[in-house]
Image (cartoon, rainbow, N blue to C red):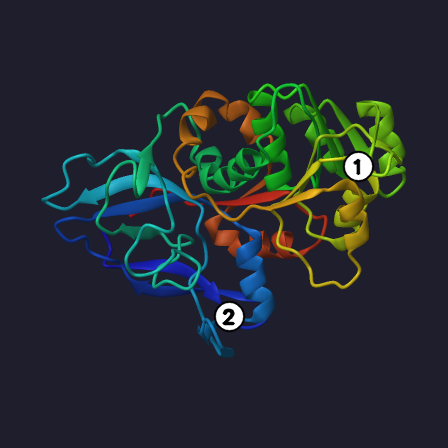
Amino acid sequence: MSTTMRSVQTAGTNAVEVVETPRPAPGPNDALLRVRACGICGTDTAFLHMGGFPKNAHLGGELRPIVLGHEPAGEVVEVGGAVTDLKVGDRVVVNPQSGHSGIIGCGGSQGALSEYLLLEDVAVGKSVAKFPETVPFAVASLNEPMAVALHAVNRSQAKPTDAVVVFGAGPIGLGATIWLKLRGVRHVVVADVIPERLTKALEVGADAVINSATEDVTARLKELHGEAANALGQQRAGTDVYIDAAGVPAVINAAVNSAKWHAKLVMVAVQKPTDKLDLGGMLRSELTLIASQGYPTEIFEVTPQLVEHHERFAKIISHEVPYAEVERAFELALTPGAADKVVVTLGGED
């Protein structure tokens, strides 16, 4: 096994480079993972838009390059002498927040878009979870974003009797749609402006879709979910839960305009700054606004169902790109509408 490895790091605004770095060696409590697949997240592209990571994460200022990637799946190739619950050959997904040297791919010393990843103080159920050979590495790499999606659904407390609309048919919105249907929610609508994404939403289980670029969202929701009223008795859609996986002000306002009395709005997408929110409309519906961040408990709660339903989750992936073409993978991820979920795949060469 080589003593060096390749890693992908930021190289200025909207640019990446592959660099040669020392291959980490596991200590007694660690394991070494050969990364087989790693998804590209909106967080990765956000770092590229910035041109790096702030040297002072709280105060901003000068930027430094960082190794990217926090959605890995791979194979254990070395274990420390004190590790008892993992062995060479185990296939695992990773909690990127579990390492003591910082969050993987988000300012820590490591990134998962590397050929190898050091699993520090590794423990099954805390830092990694195993998955079987029946699940492709690329699909297993969805574990982390699907945990984000599940947390949003958990925060919504959607019931089987509820009617829900998900705004945004990207990976998180599609994941939320799957989780809602697996939860038994009776009717799930997905809204987006890209027809191909709406087609995919139907493929993963949405009951109906709305093209919000060409259709009146409130009118369609009334048609699909029936009519109700807000706190003032004004006619509104019968939708119980709105999930924002798009992150644009128009989505928030579409929810406010449609919301019945005591509807809920869950924000899981990173929000764009705006002063155009209709707060008075929220008041008229007593709309409950719920923020959803990360995955406090869900990171490995998703794994068994991801394994069981891996063919359904696989539909979320639009592009699998080999590591040798990682620049192209980021071009796809940085181009609006060009891709849904891009996963970089790595071979098994030493």
Q: Which residue bears the numbered disc 1?
A: 195
Residue at 69% x, 47% y: name it: 246
Image location of residue 185, percent across then percent down: 63, 21
Nearer to us in this view, 47 or 237: 237
Mark drawn on residue 267: none
Image location of residue 304, percent across then percent down: 41, 25
Q: Going by the image, does 294 lie left or right of 245?
A: left
Q: Is residue 28 visible?
A: yes
Nearer to us in this view, 167 or 83: 167
Q: Going by the image, does 128 lie left or right of 287?
A: left
Residue at 56% x, 65% y: name it: 48
Q: Is residue 251 visible?
A: no
Nearer to us in this view, 300 or 229: 229
Marks 1 and 2, how far apart at CA: 33 Å
- Tag 1 and tag 2, C-beta contact below 8 Å: no
Image location of residue 252, percent across then percent down: 75, 48
Q: Residue furthest front?
A: 232
Location of residue 198 by image quarter: top right
- The first of marks 1 and 2 along the sequence is 2
Q: Residue furthest bottom?
A: 62
Residue at 29% x, 36% y: name it: 125
Residue at 47% x, 72% y: name it: 58
The kind of secondary structure element at disc 1 is helix
Task: Check disc 1 and give the amino acid type.
Answer: Pro
Q: Relative to 86, does residue 280 appear above or below in the rendering?
A: below
The kind of secondary structure element at disc 2 is loop
Location of residue 349 by image quarter: top left
How crowded pointer 1 is (Cα within 10 Å; few <14, some 14-19, many 20+) is rated as: some
Task: Check disc 2 and give the amino acid type.
Answer: Gly
Image location of residue 298, percent across then percent down: 43, 37
Q: Which residue bears the numbered disc 2?
A: 52
